[in-house]
Image (tube, helix red, strand yellow):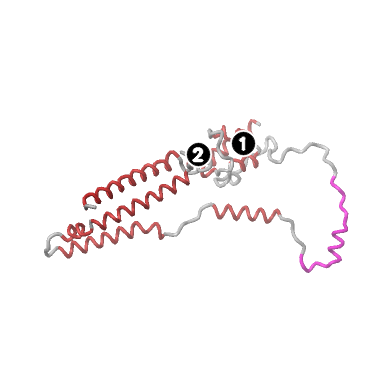
Amino acid sequence: MHRPTLNFLIDTLAFVAFAFLTTTGILTRYLLPPGSGRWATLWGLNRHEWGDLHFWVAVVLLGVLALHLILHWKWIICIVKGKRSDASGARVALGTVGLIGLMTLTATPLLAPVERIGEPRQASRLESEARAAQPATPDVGQGTDELAAEQTTVQAPPEAPTQTPLPESRPIPGSSAPSNEDIRGSMTLGEVARSTGIPLDRLVSGLGLPPNIDPDERIGRIRKRFDVSPDDVRGVVNSYLAGH
């Protein structure tokens, strides 16, 4: 294959990969925003699958650009060196320093440590609540007589309540609204509805959210998509409790 034809094919492939890279980037940023992987798809692919396609297109583009540099390496060296003169060495050194600096700058995000915000704290809180809900086990050193006495003890059944109790998920009318510590960005809409007693559809409509929004999505993620903060959630809850 002639060199001009090979250069044309490589440049064409690089342009096509660049076009697809731009399209998939815009798609995952605006058409399928963060948090839409559970309920939105395009051509049968959700946000995460389009993200995988975006990554592999970037790999293809990087490979094509590397091949392009290899085929034009002699031309690049000639341009950097220029005509032999007293300034040739300084020009080569400056180009080498610039290349090393560029590679260091682009590799820095890949080498930096990743900070975990929210997830470990939420997981530890759920684990502590689960451990607190488990019944306490007797000590190994407890005597057999005490265990036998506990097993044979007959407890009287609790008396039936004379009044119908209120549902646990609905607070007593006129009670104070949840405090700032009760409603956080790490909570989901379903958790807020269960802890405050407000119907889920009332909470969703009061916040101006789509009716088909996932109730298990956290308020912090919803804030990025719909500009809904925990203060807005508290306001809807307060309005519901005040008018209830």
The residue type indicated by label 1 comes to Leu
Residue occupying the point 85% across, 44% down: 159
* Residue 82 locus on image (x, y percent): 15, 59
* Residues shaded magenta: 139-158
SS at badge 1: helix
> Along the horizontal axis of the image, is 114 left or right of 237?
left
Q: Residue furthest bottom?
A: 141
Quadrant assignment for the C terminus: top right
Total labels: the figure holds 2
Q: Which mark is residue 74?
A: none
Tell me the mark number nearer the camera, choosing from 2 and 1. 2
Residue underneath mark 1: 200
Residue occupying the point 19% across, 59% down: 80
* Residue 137 locus on image (x, y percent): 75, 61
> Along the horizontal axis of the image, is 53 left or right of 85?
right
Residue occupying the point 87% across, 61% down: 149
- 146 is within the stretch colored magenta: yes
* Residue 180 locus on image (x, y percent): 58, 44
- 86 is within the stretch colored magenta: no
* Residue 60 locus on image (x, y percent): 36, 51
Say if 87 sits above or below 21 in the image.
Answer: below
Q: Which mark is residue 40?
A: 2
Residue occupying the point 42% across, 59% down: 112
Q: Which residue is at the front of the view, 57 or 218?
A: 57
Say if 59 sits above or below 29 in the image.
Answer: below
> Along the horizontal axis of the image, is 8 left or right of 26?
left
The residue type indicated by label 2 comes to Ala
